[in-house]
Amino acid sequence: MKGVDLERLFAADEKEIRDAYTTDVYFERTNKILNSKGLESTDVWAEFTLGSLPNKWPWAVLCGTEEVLRLMEGINVDIFGVPEGTIFRSRSPKGIRVPLMNVRGRYTEFGEMETAMLGMLCHPSGVATAAARVRCAAKDRTVMAFGNRRMHPAISGVLDRSAYIGGCDDVASKIGADIIGKEAVGTVPHSLMLMMGSDEAAFRAFDEIIEKSVPRIMLIDTFSDEREASIKACETIKDLKGVRLDTPSSRRGSFKEIIQEVRWELDSKGYRDVRIIASGGLDENSIKDLMVTAVSGFGVGTSISNAPTLDISMDLVCKNGSSISKKGKFGGRKYTYRCERCLSMDVSLSPDDDLKCACGSRMTMCEVPLMRAGKRTATKKPKEIREYVIAQLKQLGEL
């Protein structure tokens, strides 16, 4: 015990992560043994791969690299890897695990960071992949990330950044919005209506108190029929931008038909410019079902924030220049190649191999230097990474 305050909140702070206080304890013990046996200078290569993707996903989005680099900055290591935001397959056509990142250095200088590095890649990559799949289902319609309330608040920024990189247009938390360089978005919670006593009172109070720069999008299913409440919102707020339907499953029936009915009523009363936002337990499949309606956007929470984590592992593959590996893994420093035409991936032991894709195109090595001797070589903003993801989704024909 390091004297941690047992009355504090449970989340680790940045210093505790950097000090390896959150690491699996056997890495600390391993370092102690290696230092005692005079092996502290042993040079190694470690590679990051995964064997398969969850939910039979055919591809995934790599996310979290930026945070890994921030963690490792100042530690004397070299890091190479595919760029953050890369859409990848877990294995080559021959079944070889595709390296996503390679780290070189003295094992005793970075081995204790394995737990943290993997955690910074596994969950964010799952979230970004789920967000990308929602993005594909929603096509060109707005997607807002609403999932922070389902996960620990300490990782709100991580969740929002990952969801945004995967394809969400906006995020709800202020910390997430600051990280991605945008304004936080939101509509109205049911609690405002309940506290004010009626939909109309809540609509009026919001319009009176909240600054005009915030779009007026009102929640319409707290008390009344959605159709009636939507018209009341239009009549109450002059510059109403939209209405949000979050109808609970116990009252939902056919959510699709409720939305279509609200759209008809709005149009028939002359409110054609008022948008409809749908939320409440949505995922990529339910969004596909709602695409035939006049929905303008979606608020998506748990299906993105609670995405299955990617089972990425870190394995030693070289020691003092010689190939090594545990059973089940392939030894040797490897290089990742990708076909820029179909985005298929392959693996080679050579950085200048001449690999051909099954589609007939020549593959190119897609790893880049990310850090040299503890100094980062480049960085990209979340918006740039997101644009890279969207471009790949279009290339795959998903968008």
Image (cartoon, rainbow, N blue to C red):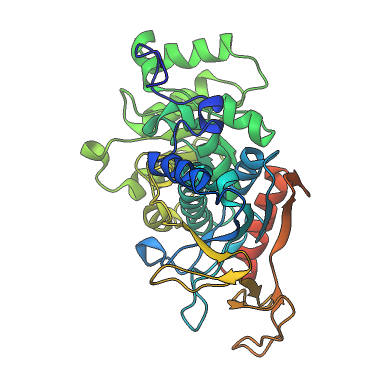
Tell me the quadrant of the picture where the N terminus can be found: top left
Taking depth in this image into account, of 142 and 242 the one nearest to the observer is 142
Left/right placement of residue 236 relative to residue 392 reads left
Which corner quadrant of the image does residue 367 belong to?
bottom right
Q: Nearer the viewer, residue 284 or 173?
A: 173
Point 61% across, 26% down: residue: 215
Residue at 43 percent of width and 15 percent of height: 200
Please tell me in which quadrant of the rendered image residue 161 appears.
top right
Identify which residue, 246 or 93, lies in the foreground: 93
- Judge whether 37 appears above or below 242 on screen: below
Residue with the most extreme right position:
377
In the image, taking residue 168 as reference, residue 151 lies left or right, namely left
Q: From the viewer's perspective, tell me whether residue 43 is left or right of residue 256.
A: right
Q: Residue furthest left?
A: 250
Q: Residue 93: image x %, image y %?
A: 51, 82
In the rendered view of the protein, which quadrant contains the C terminus? bottom right
Is any part of residue 25 visible from this angle? yes
x and y percent of residue 189 in the render? 42, 22
209 versus 105 height, above or below: above
Examine the rendered structure and indicate whether residue 229 appears above or below residue 201. below
Residue 223, given in percent of the width and then of the height, sits at 30, 22
Counting every numbered tag in the picture gives: 0
Q: Is residue 296 visible?
A: no
Position of residue 44 relative to residue 324, above or below, is above
**How far across and how far down the image is residue 88, in percent?**
56, 66
